[in-house]
Image (cartoon, grey):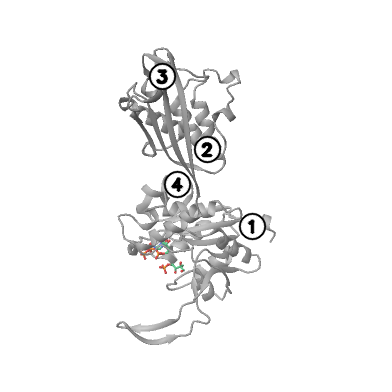
Amino acid sequence: MSEQHQKTIALIVAAGRGTRAGGALPKQWQPLAGRRVADWALKAFRNHPKVDESLLVVHPDDAQFYDSLDVKTVHGGATRDASVRAGLEALVGTGATHVLIHDVARATVPEHVIAGVIDALKTSKAAAPALAVSDALWRGEDAQVTGTQDRADLYRAQTPQGFDFETILAAHRSFDGQAADDVEVARAAGVNVTITEGDEANLKITTPGDFARAERILRGTMDIRLGNGFDVHAFEEGDHVVLCGVTIPHDKALKGHSDADVGMHAVTDAIYGALAEGDIGRHFPPSEMEWKDADSAIFLKHAVDLAASKGFTISNIDCTLICERPKIGPNAAKMISRMAELMGMDEDRVSIKATTSERLGFTGREEGIAALATATLVKS
Ligand SMILES: Nc1ccn([C@@H]2O[C@H](COP(=O)(O)OP(=O)(O)OP(=O)(O)O)[C@@H](O)[C@H]2O)c(=O)n1
Ligand SMILES: C[C@](O)(CO)[C@H](O)COP(=O)(O)O
């Protein structure tokens, strides 16, 4: 079959209860490196150029967790086998030619593991990743070694396990009993399975300690950027200032080519800085009359959109306004709300605070306001 006529579906089983992992929620809905376990597993397949669609097999009790997800779902069964079977039946008539059956609990699956399985399916009806056992193996009882086991041909099985769709559907329909995985089901139907390269990073979150291991794996693959921004605007005659998007009555105004929102400028420059994209002046030159008295939200939105276009999420913002007056405290909540809205962020990721300079320097003499900001951007 030509690659053009292939339709590869990621069938992600997520209907288990995660009892061994502990915690208040089933493990797939617990937080992991800023998202949930299931979000990471879905993302691994959604980002893969050779995977056409995903289907998530879920537990009916978990609707509150999966309802907001932009993915097709189907209810699973009481065992992993039953959940896989429910997923396969839901794919009948969809034109699926290949299916990659994956445990949601393997949220850290590396791209090359998925690619290895897809490549092997060009010449094989079934392929799955595994790692050769490298430790010596013992048998034991009551904390005593009772024997040894030859490890020469032993492998540790992983997922995604990939199959020609009709082959694995028929194998599951005819399978009677319980299987550890879909390779066992396929082999019971006489299907040969190719072993592809697994990875230690393809961890199955099973016990409580696995969350920290998975978090370390994901953090290790993240591109984390830090940027800073600093801005100053002098006072001139006027009756209000605009700070972090909020208009505050004052006995002076801030002087500037735009609306002189010194706080928003510092935050915008911090985002540009994290992207190594210069500063506001580079994108909106003061020499251009178009930006005279402009709303600084235009600059901030440009920086936010630029970050998104490069695949970055803004993880948090911290901005300090330096002035004696106006008092920032009473306005901080409104500023946080406006800035979070403009950046499409949760308010608890936006910090806006203030300090005086103890009447020292230009801010102490109330000649102007300075602002300092830090932005953390993450691409995963
Ligand atoms: N009835 C079931 C049981 C398991 N699974 C899925 O199969 C995968 C592998 O199972 P395991 O890691 O054992 O998950 P749980 O069954 O959730 O964990 P536990 O055995 O600790 O309860 C998981 O992605 C799990 O959600 C499933 O979809 N339906
Ligand atoms: C399919 C599997 O991931 C292969 O290693 C594994 O068998 C599933 O987890 P379980 O704990 O055996 O249910």
At x 36% / y 23%, what residue is drawn? 364
Q: Which residue lies under the disc numbered 1?
A: 6
> Counting residues from the N terminus, which is met first, the one under dot 3 or under dot 1?
1
Q: How far apart are marks 2 and 3 (CA)?
A: 27 Å
**Pair 4/1: label in front:** 4
Q: Residues within 10 Å of mark 1 (few under 14, many from 20)?
A: some
Q: In this view, does 211 lie above or below 145?
A: above
At x 56% / y 28%, what residue is drawn? 281
Q: Is residue 144 above or below residue 119?
A: below
Q: Is residue 142 above or below residue 361?
A: below
The outermost residue toward the bottom is 147
> Counting residues from the N terminus, which is met first, the one under dot 2 or under dot 3?
2
Residue 71: give x, y in percent of width and height.
49, 49
Disc 2 and disc 3 in contact, CB within 8 angstroms:
no
Indicate the quadrant where residue 328 lies: top left
Q: Which residue lies under the disc numbered 2?
A: 273
Q: In this view, does 66 lie above or below 251?
A: below
User: Label 4 amino acid?
Assistant: Leu
Q: Distance between the residues labelled 4 and 1?
A: 25 Å
At x 43% / y 62%, what residue is drawn? 83
Residue 277: give x, y in percent of width and height.
57, 37
Q: Which residue lies under the disc numbered 3?
A: 367
Q: Which mark is residue 69?
A: 4
Q: How crowded is mark 3: few (under 14 residues within 10 Å), some or many (20 or more)?
A: some
The outermost residue toward the front is 360
Q: What element carries label 4?
A: loop
